[in-house]
Image (cartoon, rainbow, N blue to C red):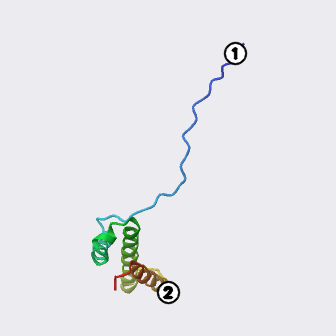
Amino acid sequence: MQHSATIAPSKPKRVRARTLTTVSKATRLGKRIAELKSIYADTVGPGAASSPLMALRVAEAAETKALAEFARGNFLRGTSSDRLDDIIRAERRAVAAEKALGSVS
């Protein structure tokens, strides 16, 4: 005698992985990031920018610099709750990311 068990369909598993977020290109910050990416890519050179690693470094430097500028501007306008040492740390990381590109001065 065969016993056929009916299996109830299970709910789809919930994916709890975090998705990486991006900045909307329609905002002022997004436009500044795009502008900096273009500047850094031109400075590094067309051959180097085609490398996936260099393209990642260019994007990282542009995003870091734009976020540091944004935080500094908000702090100076008095619309930010960030502490000054956090803003200085962001500026230093932006400078380090620019130096990692090599020929950007």
Question: Mark 1 packing: few (<14 Cα in 10 Å), some, or many (20+)?
Answer: few
Q: In terms of depth relative to the viewer, which is nearer, 9 or 41?
A: 41
Q: In terms of depth relative to the viewer, which is nearer, 86 or 95?
A: 95
The amino acid type, in three-letter code, at marker 1 is Gln
The amino acid type, in three-letter code, at marker 2 is Asp
Residue at left 47%, top 57%? 19
From this viewpoint, which residue is outermost toward the top?
Answer: 1
Which mark is drawn over residue 12?
none
* The quadrant where residue 1 appears: top right
Where is 87 relative to 15, above or below? below
Q: Are marks 2 and 1 in contact (CB under 8 Å)?
A: no
Which residue position holds label 2?
Answer: 85
100 displayed left or right of 47? right
In x, y percent, where is residue 57? 40, 72
> Label 2 vs label 1: CA separation?
72 Å
- Describe the element under mark 2 as helix, strand or loop: helix
In x, y percent, where is residue 71? 40, 79
Which mark is drawn over residue 2?
1
